[in-house]
Amino acid sequence: MYLELAPDSVVRKREIVGIFDIDTSTVMKNTRDYLNRAEKNGEVETVTFDLPRSFTVTAKGNKDQKIYISRFSPSTLAKR
C-alpha cells in the first residue's frame, strides 16, 4: 500500500516511521534540531508550497531516512 503525501509524491506505508504535526512537535528543541540536521544532510523534501502542517519520517533501512513536509494534517494522512 502507498500513502499519497502530495499529487506527485507517494511513499510505501511500510516505510513510514511516523507522521507528526508540525505545530505541536516543533515546540521541543530536540525536534527542531533533528529537522535542521536532516535538512543539512539533504534528507528533507518539501512537497507543498502551502503552509506546512505535518512531516512524515520514512526509512527503508537503518541509514536510508527521508522526511517529507506536507500541507495535510496528520489526521488527514492517517485516514488515507
Image (tube, helix red, strand yellow):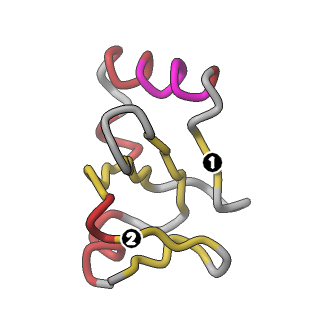
Q: Type of residue at label 2?
A: Arg
**Rendered residue at 54%/21% (across/down):** 36
**Which disc is residue 32 wearing?**
none
Residue 64: horizontal and vertical position, in percent? 44, 39
**Which disc is residue 45 wearing?**
1
Taking depth in this image into account, of 75 and 47 the one nearest to the observer is 47
**Rendered residue at 64%/60% (across/down):** 47
**Rendered residue at 64%/51% (across/down):** 46
Q: Are marks 1 and 2 in contact (CB under 8 Å)?
A: no
Residue 3: horizontal and vertical position, in percent? 40, 77
Characterize the local packing of mark 1: few (<14), some (14-19) or many (20 or more) Cα atoms within 10 angstroms.
some
Numbered disc 2: secondary structure = strand
Q: Which residue is mark 2?
A: 12
Whether residue 78 sits left or right of residue 67 in the image: it is left
**Rendered residue at 57%/36% (across/down):** 43
Of discs 1 and 2, which sits in the foreground? Answer: 2
Q: Earlier in the sequence, mark 1 or mark 2?
A: 2
Image mark count: 2
Residue 37, magenta (yes or no): yes
From the image, which quarter does the C terminus lie in?
Answer: bottom left
Residue 15: horizontal and vertical position, in percent? 32, 59
- The boundaries of the magenta stretch are 34-39
Taking depth in this image into account, of 67 and 27 the one nearest to the observer is 67
Q: Taken as a whole, is the magenta stretch helix, strand or loop? A: helix
